[in-house]
Amino acid sequence: MGKKILLIDDDPDLGRLVGLILQHMDITVYQSYSGLDGLKQSYEIHPDLVILDIMMPVMNGFDVCLRLREISNVPVLMLTARAEESDILRAFNVGADDYVKKPFNKNEFEARVYALLRRSNQLNARAASSYIQSYEDPILKIDISSQTITLKGEFVECSPREYSVLACLVREQGKIVSKRELVREVWGEPVSNGLSNPSLYVYYLRKKLQDGCYGHQYIHTLWGRGYWFEPRKEE
């Protein structure tokens, strides 16, 4: 079955160019011309990849990416004329998976699209495999298959990236998972300029799980080596 790519960019010519470049890859390209419409289309068509410009009226690409990360794990490729390092850093911090500058090289662009689609397939396959699928104790419950987390009976809202980091640690509970392994599992490969940052997401998770506040610490750090999830011992 062919893949669906959603291009969110206010330039109609770019949509035609992307469609021509990718037409041999059994890909259907949909285009939205604004951030708000792009979010709506993303919800409706469930694309396999979103290609996103930064400079758009009303809602810029950074804000769109943040909103996408609240509802989806879909890979996001920023495709923009903005080339400042601060823009690249901000893009990855709001959840982008890759960054390509305009004007772009056709072969490089095609390779990056293919890589993101491949990573998406690999992550979906791993999620459906026979890893540990849940964790439960009197305080914390994590259901990896349904992507739900409850703390003392209350649902914990996590971004898709935060959830993916936690799921990786839970599946490998008791084992030290290196930063490199986390990046490979959650991001697929180290992203451009090494800007994937699992430490930041571990920090967010600890705050949301109120880690250590109920007599037990779940996520531990071994400096220089990585992180591990430690189950609560039965009382």
Image: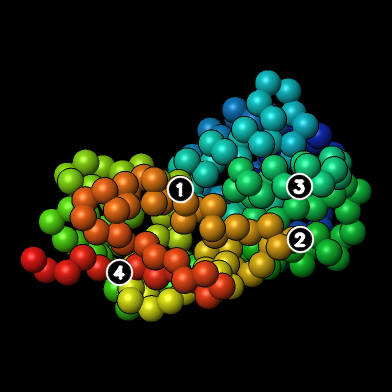
Assess disc 1: are there few (<14), some (14-19) or many (≥20) residues with their C-alpha within 10 Å of its C-alpha: some
- Marked residue nearer the N-terminal end (4 or 1): 1
Residues 102 and 221: in front is: 221
The amino acid pointed to by label 2 is Asn
- In three-dimensional space, the C-alpha distance between marks 3 and 2, rounded to whole angstroms, equals 9 Å
Q: CA distance from mark 1 to mark 2?
A: 22 Å
Residue 84, horizontal then vertical, whole percent: 85, 43
For disc 1, the marked residue is 204
- Counting residues from the start of the chain, the first of labels 3 and 4 encountered is 3
State the SS at label 2.
helix
Does the CB distance between marks 3 and 2 fall below 8 Å? yes
Amino acid under disc 1: Tyr
10 Å crowding of disc 4: few (<14), some (14-19), many (20+): some
- The quarter of the picture where the C terminus appears is bottom left
Of mark 2 and mark 4, the one earlier in the sequence is 2
Find numbered disc 1 in the image and state the secondary structure of the residue it sits on. Answer: helix
Q: Residue at x 61, y 43 (%)?
A: 94
Residue at mark 2? 193
Residue 88 is labelled as 3
Which mark is on residue 230?
Answer: 4
Report the label total.
Answer: 4
- The mark closer to the camera, 3 or 4, is 4
Horizontal side of residue 47 vs 149, given as left or right? right
Q: Residue at x 21, y 55 (%)?
A: 215
User: Does the residue at mark 3 contact the one at mark 4 (Cβ under 8 Å)?
Assistant: no
